Amino acid sequence: MKWLVLILSLLVTPTFAVQPDEMLNDPALEARARSLSEGLRCPVCRNESIDESNADISRDLRLLLRERLVTGDTDEEAVQYLVDRYGTYILLKPRVEGANLLLWIAAPLMLIIAGGVAFVSVRSRATAGGADPLSAEEQARIDEIMQRDP
Amino acid sequence: MIVELGHFALILAALVGVVQMIVPLWGAHKGWRGWMAMAHPAATTQFALMAFSFLALTYAFVVSDFSVRLVFANSHSAKPMLYKISGVWGNHEGSMLLWLLILTLFGACAAWFGGNLPRSLQARVLAVQAAVSVAFYAFILFTSNPFERLEFPPFDGRDLNPLLQDPGLAFHPPFLYLGYVGLSMAFSFAIAALLEGRVDAAWGRWVRPWTLAAWVFLTIGIALGSWWAYYELGWGGFWFWDPVENASFMPWLLAAALLHSAIVVEKRESLKAWTILLAILAFGFSLLGTFIVRSGVLTSVHAFANDPERGVFILAILGVFVGGGLLLFAWRATAMEAKGVFGMVSRETALVTNNVLLAVSCFVVFVGTIWPLVVELASARSMWQVGGSLIENPFYTMGLFSKPEQVSVGPPFFNAAFTPFFVALAVILPVGAVLAWKRGSLRRAAAPMLPVAGLAIALGALAFALQTGRSAMGPVGVVLGVWVVGGAAMDLWLRTGRGAMGNRLSRLRRLPRADWGKFTAHAGLGITIFAIAALMAWEDEDIRVAQVGDRWDVGIHSIQLNSVDNVDGPNYFAERADMTVFRNGREVGHLYPEKRTYPVAGMPTTEAGIRNGVLRDVYVVLGDAQSAGGWAVRSYIKPFANWIWGGAILMALGGFISLSDRRLRVAAGAARRKPEGVPAE
């Protein structure tokens, strides 16, 4: 993470992001703006949302987003408005569509494959050998032995 | 002169490495004892030379010898001594030197403490270890020489990045490297075992301590970095899913998987091939992390294409070792016959599930990290330049892309895609950890956990009732945390067997340290899971312009801005605010957040004012002065923040406790002692 720092340091000036003068008076609307801007990428930074970034363009985007919300856009409409102008690049969470489908199904697919391979190999091993399970009688006897205080 | 001697020692170490890579390997192949025995002094010599080389560079930093390019670029005469020293590894070249120092240290340890290893196995391990170090010697000598001199030495240096001038970060890279490089031992053992064609319980017992140690160091390194980000970057974030963080997280996940599967090899002589594969992959991810971070490929594909020398070199190292390792694996793995059989419901199966979940979660991180790169490359242009000729981009013909595209994969993706796997892991952990080896009964394992589950759900419900109208994340975190911690405690208690309470208590004290280690590490995991959920769900935030004298509320706290003054540090000047913190109207202390400017590096940084508490941190950041008067101020209440790193420390501590277990100490080559008996008095 030292490397993170080296790179971050070029791009993050660690003063803060959302300035008091940008914030909306309506707390509900402001909360929506905050949560939306956490999912929007600062176009000129590395892996920073516009909520964290203090690049000028991020400020513009934050203000634009708030303007749209104030004019009555839904969350989706406001985000779409920005995406239309800045591209899907600004979405920190790629939409489940097009080539990005691969990104989203990669993990579940891997889980199914890995789980399947593990299951098959464990089952073949389980059936390949091993003693018969204990009968109820044997189990009861073992339980009785185990109950004795050592 | 000393610098040149360091350079010379580095070259000598590289030559010794070449010898150590070839002679013992050939000796092991032919069964020649003398050739095998060569590995031992060679490993020691390599380490001694590297230590000298590293000290030489450190000396240049300590005396601020600005005729050395690296010192000039990363140091300054006015810098405090601690940061002069940490400046040695606070840059690319120096950090690669540290990497090699640690690599040769591990090699030397395998030579010193590996006396009870089969002779040929030890020779092969040391040869593979030397091969890895030779690759890095070549990398450092040909692309990243730290000893380069400047023809006209300047009067003073450019200073280390001020963000790096921090005690938490001074020790972050060494720990991380101990972890990364520690995994090279697992790799060397895996390759040696494949060459040897034999994996047995003794092999598992040998690999486990090294992997465990590497994992412990990775845990500490990651936790230090996360803690540093929390207090230094200025908004209290602790994990950003940044590619460079992911680069250290992926080996951590695989190392966790590896140290669990090595248990199965050791105790049950099963899962051998899988464990070998994991060992190769875990080190592969260490190298991949190095590539990701060192090549600049993530900043931009084009930046990488313009200056590809280092990146291509690391990619070649990655290709040779991981590719070669995997080929060898494909060729020899079938020779690894499993001895132990186990049923569908057994501890082995639980550990297989653990491995599947950890490996897949690592895969999620991997895919998310490289996805922007893949899309950029695949959609680059309609023609690809391959060698000298142009070919049509196959992804266009497939219809996947119609124009060059760029995507971002950030925290929202990782939170959504990664979290389910860790939740699943936490859910199965307590039951899986008490299943019987070989053939278990789910009902028997789950029965003692029922009270724990009841407690977890009850506390979760309580949290839900107390937190009016917030997301379900907090209560879910409580349930998972209590379930994992309580499960770990129940596991420990079950180990005491049956009988009267007094007997069990005295047995509890005498349990092997491995059991205590397991308890501590699992409990640490539970605490961290809980703390992350709690911090994300229950944080309070306030952003405002404050005038001197203003007082405002954040949760049950209120904060008052008393004054803002100018203060000077050794190599910076700052504006420092004095703030009073009140809880429930009563004064509890002062905070002094700062805004610093480092004139040499020309960079502003913030020093947050943090009041650490057991249940919550009060976290205040001073922002810019406003033109209309007053100061921008951000204040947060961060509940259970310290528990995140507390949990991580417990995990690392659990690893250490396990390492100190007699079985592992003996395996790792500590002097054999007689079995510990009851004291005679």
Image (cartoon, coloured by chain):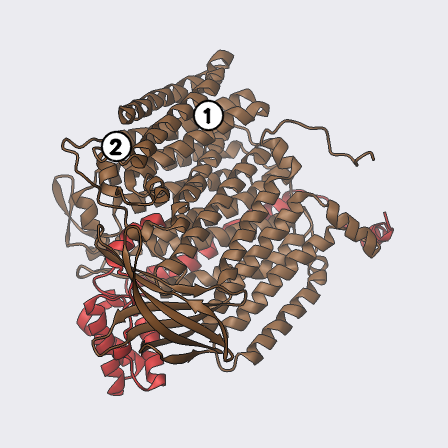
Chain at numbered mark 2: B
Quarter of the image where the C terminus of chain B is located: top right
Q: From this viewpoint, is residue B59 visible? A: yes
Near-viewer residue (B548 or B146): B548
- Which chain contains the residue that carries disc 1? B
Q: In this rendering, do the residues under marks 2 and 1 share a single chain? A: yes
B566 sits to left or right of B127: left
Look at the numbered disc 2 and give the secondary structure of its residue.
Answer: loop
- Amino acid residing under circle 1: Leu
Which residue is at a point 36% across and 21% down the rendered structure image? B18
Depicted B401 relative to depicted B585: above or below: above
- In-front residue for pair A53/B263: A53
Instruction: Answer above or below: position of B147 versus B275.
Output: above
Q: Is residue A11 left or right of residue B178?
A: left
Q: Tag 1's secondary structure?
A: helix
- Tell me the kind of residue under disc 2: Asn
Identify the residue position indicated by label 1 in the image. B126
At horizontal 20% and vertical 41% (from top left) the residue drawn is B156
Residue in front for this viewpoint, B675 or B417? B675
Picture coordinates of residue A85 (x, y %)? 18, 72
Q: Earlier in the sequence, mark 2 or mark 1?
A: 1
Q: Is residue B428 above or below residue B658?
A: below
**Chain B: drawing colour:** brown
Question: Which residue is denoted by mark 2 in the rendering?
Answer: B145
Q: Which chain is red?
A: A
Question: On screen, B245 above or below B635?
Answer: above
